Amino acid sequence: MRPPAPWAILHIDLEQLPKRLEAPAGARGVVLYFRLRGMVLGLAHELPNAFPMARGDLARRAALATGDTVALLLGSGLRPIPPCEAGRYWTLSPVPDATSLDRLARLITARRAVTSNLEASIVICTRRRAADLDGCLASLLGEIAKGRDIVVVDNGPDPETEAVTRRNPGVRYVQEPRPGLSRARNAGIAVARGDVAVFVDDDVRPEPGWIEPLLAGFAPGVDVVCGLVLPETLGAEAQIAFQYDLGFGGMGHLPLMFDREFLDKTAGSPPVWDIGAGANMAVRRRRVLELGGFDERVGPGAAGGCGDDSEYWHRVLHAGGRIVYEPRSVVRHRHRDNWTDLKRQAYGYGFGHIVALFAQYGRQRDRRDLRRALLTMPLWLLGRALKAPVRRLAGKPDRLAGSWLRGYAGALAHLPLAFRAPPVSDHSLKAGADDV
């Protein structure tokens, strides 16, 4: 049974294991992230009664949590591989020893030394969340000091957001008054000076050096690189539910490569939504312009919910491009700490996912997308609704089921997207059209 909040998060350096690890005071659960040269290799969940933990016990837990990942990373040479090939590198009972960890540490260091000649623009799309934006920009002070091109796109222009931006010399402020995250992304693409636009949400805090692995991932033919998103804190029940019940904690620790074969070999609708997160995403600016930009009918502020990122990933793969998931790039996300906000997000997830499927079918005519929207998802939601009374009696209520159901119902009003021709382009992209 999942322990109640608050949970503590501890990041453990595998090369410097403490002699004795104590549980943070007041924590009812502890998440241990095991890291090597900054790269997350695995995690473990512990109860307070497991502490204090001696170095030997901690090492054994680390071995169990990271064994498969270490074996795969060594076998693949830390190169992104197709998801279906991950199993070929696993041993029957992988237990990383000092030698294998040392080999992997050298490999991570060597990969970090690989630099890219691509120029990057960091684009932060925000809407009336000046405090979040202030924290995000504070985490980017190193990039600001380097003179990196950083653009804040204000999608609900207000004086506080502009004031926060102006306090950071060198950060450009752009207004996109028409609501919609896709419109804000397109406005950022239009003014970005770099070959690559790196999108981070205003409620994430990039770790130092997070941008280099994203840029290094742009091998020939790669159009998108996504990174890992970790929780900043798990101090409230709503934050734990967001991480484990809303699907945000599903990103793994293995570098993966997605291509057209990923689409063709998937029986159902290809799960492009599992590739990564738009909160930590880099895209080739030229390719975005060629493909017509982010679909402004989809996503927060437009139709609603989410799906603007995954719809674009779906389009990239259908066009023959490739997408890399690179977990060496890490940002930390501020999860909402109250149920009202979380239910609103669950509604948005249920809503946005279906609208994105409609838009994908409208472009590609892939029946698997329409089947998921009109058959698979309703059956899943029905099963969840039927289990809700039993869960409530068992003391484990499904507090997000209603939000998912309402989101799905609301999305059905956008079914016509599946049968309309997609927009050719948007005026916010015309400023960059000459660069293609």
Image: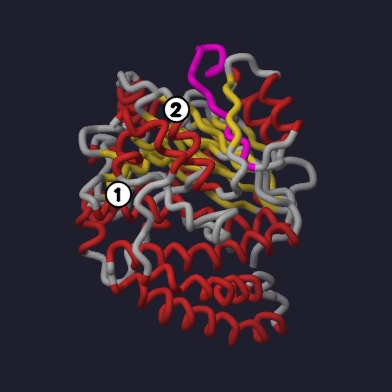
Residue sitting at x 51%, y 45%: 183
The residue positioned farthest toward the right in the image shown: 26
As drawn, 280 above or below 316: above
Query: Is there a contact, CB below 8 Å, between mark 2 and mark 1?
Result: no
Question: Residue 218 versus residue 75: which sits nearer the camera?
Answer: 218
Image position, residue 81 (x, y; %)? 25, 45
- Residue beneath the point at 28% across and 32% down: 436
Region in magenta: 142-155
Q: Position of residue 233 (x, y in %)?
A: 67, 44
Q: Nearer the viewer, residue 429 or 311?
A: 429
Give the structural element (helix, strand or loop) at label 1: helix
- The reply to whether residue 351 is in sight is yes
Q: Position of residue 11 (x, y in %)?
A: 57, 36
Badge 2 marks a residue whose secondary structure is loop
Q: Amino acid at mark 1?
A: Val
Q: Residues within 10 Å of mark 1 (few under 14, many from 20)?
A: many
**How many marks can you see?**
2
The one of 9 and 399 positioned closer to us in this rendering = 399
Residue 107 sits above or below residue 167 on the image? below
Task: Name the residue located 29 percent from the left edge and 35 percent from the top edge.
Answer: 78
Query: Is 147 one of the magenta-colored residues?
Result: yes
**Is residue 389 rendered magenta in the image?**
no
Q: Which label is found at residue 316?
A: 1
Residue on which disc 2 sits: 192
Q: Amino acid at mark 2?
A: Ala
Q: Earlier in the sequence, mark 2 or mark 1?
A: 2
Q: CA distance from mark 2 to mark 1?
A: 20 Å
Is residue 207 or residue 7 the one in the foreground?
207
Where does the image place residue 20, in percent across and percent down from the top left? 64, 34
Q: Is residue 395 left or right of residue 427?
A: right
